[in-house]
Image (cartoon, rainbow, N blue to C red):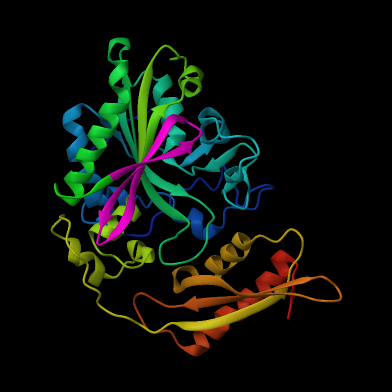
Amino acid sequence: MILRRVWRSNCTRRPFSSFPYDRYPLDAPGCNVPRNIAERVGTNLHRQPQHPLGILQRQILEFWQPHGFDLYDQLSPIVSTTNNFDALRIPSDHVSRSPSDTYYLNADTVLRTHTSAHQHELLRAGHHRFLVSGDVYRRDEIDRSHYPIFHQMEGVKLFAPHEQNSIESELKESLEQLAEHLFGPDITKRWIDTYFPFTEPSFELEILFEGEWLEVLGCGVIHPEVLEKTGRGDEMGYAFGLGLERLAMVLFQIPDIRLFWTHDERFHRQFASGEIVQFEPYSKFPPCYKDISFWLESAFHVNDLNEIVRDVAGDLVERVWLMDDFVHPKTGKTSHCYRIAYRSMDRSLTNEEIDDLQEIVRNRVVDDLGVILR
């Protein structure tokens, strides 16, 4: 793989996919990537200069670039399980490795679940300080703050032996300054001790925003075993990661994560200045609710249901949640009732349109999950 440093993009909002279907057929054994996800590969929202994610990436880059950080923001999201999990000390039985949580192309290849998946190859290539930005993929719940594709920015810096006593203090000081760069100099901040397999010690930075504590990023001192795997066991360093959507939803006041993917010009023209501005909602269409109830099979996972609903309805689905569960007193079987909220960001939906989608969902749930509808 050739790693290229890239600073700017002329990417447009046209639908585009760079997914290599010939190399990774979606119907191959072990592949759980639906076509609607594969079609988004290569969209690169984070590289569009008049998109909230692109604007935020530029703001973050403006902070780090004077410190000598190189940006890699065009690395392929198709990575090995070795780089995505093993190189980062993620245990073999960790839930993140499960096909219910991760998109597998085959047993050894996934759509990256975090930008940390490139840490190993960049460190092995000899880089000392760098940023990685890109789209990451996770099978997840459906609501206004979760989407199967989102964007992260990863930062890594290694230190010379005589500098290693200052790693933690420089890490925290730099990230506090980044938070002030994004949210203003008067913010209230706090550090929370946490755990990540690839850093030790590990921390989360939170800021007090509109009366509530908001997690801004996770970070820590790179675990020695991670560096040893790259052949750089005699060095030390730090790493941090930011979720771009999480920050952009706050900074731009964007209420629904699906809006980042809209093609509606009423959304995009609000950010033509390329600066952080508050989003002004242009329409609020009513939701349409539909319920689906079925008896569970032992292998059922709610993310399998979510994937079917997304595959059928795309961005017309706003939320899926459990309304009721029931255990039959005689058979001991469990039934779940899920409510699906359909709502378009751009237009009003008809009952007939939603009824058609719901019928497809019901049929797919039976065919794909083997459950019995109630």
Regarding residue 316, the answer to whether it shows in the image is yes
Taking 7 as reference, is 46 above or below it? Answer: below
Residue 282 percent location from the top left of the image: 24, 77
| Viewer-nearest residue: 31 or 190 | 190
Please say whether residue 204 is one of the residues in the magenta stretch: yes
| Viewer-nearest residue: 67 or 308 | 67
Residue 9 percent location from the top left of the image: 25, 45
Q: Residue furthest right?
A: 330
Residue 268 percent location from the top left of the image: 23, 65
* Image position of 101 (left or right of 133): right
Regarding residue 74, the answer to whether it shows in the image is no
Q: Going 39% across and 26% down the picture, which residue do you hit?
A: 122
Which residues, given as a range, are shown in magenta? 190-217
Taking 248 as reference, is 152 above or below it? Answer: above
Q: Going 23% across and 61% down the picture, which residue do you hit?
A: 252
Q: Overall secondary structure of the magenta stretch?
A: strand
Q: How many marks?
A: 0
| Viewer-nearest residue: 192 or 224 | 192
Location of the C terminus by quadrant is: bottom right
Please say whether residue 119 is one of the residues in the magenta stretch: no
* Image position of 186 (left or right of 97): left
Q: Going 32% across and 16% down the picture, which residue do you hit?
A: 164
Q: Going 34% across and 44% down the picture, which residue do you hit?
A: 217
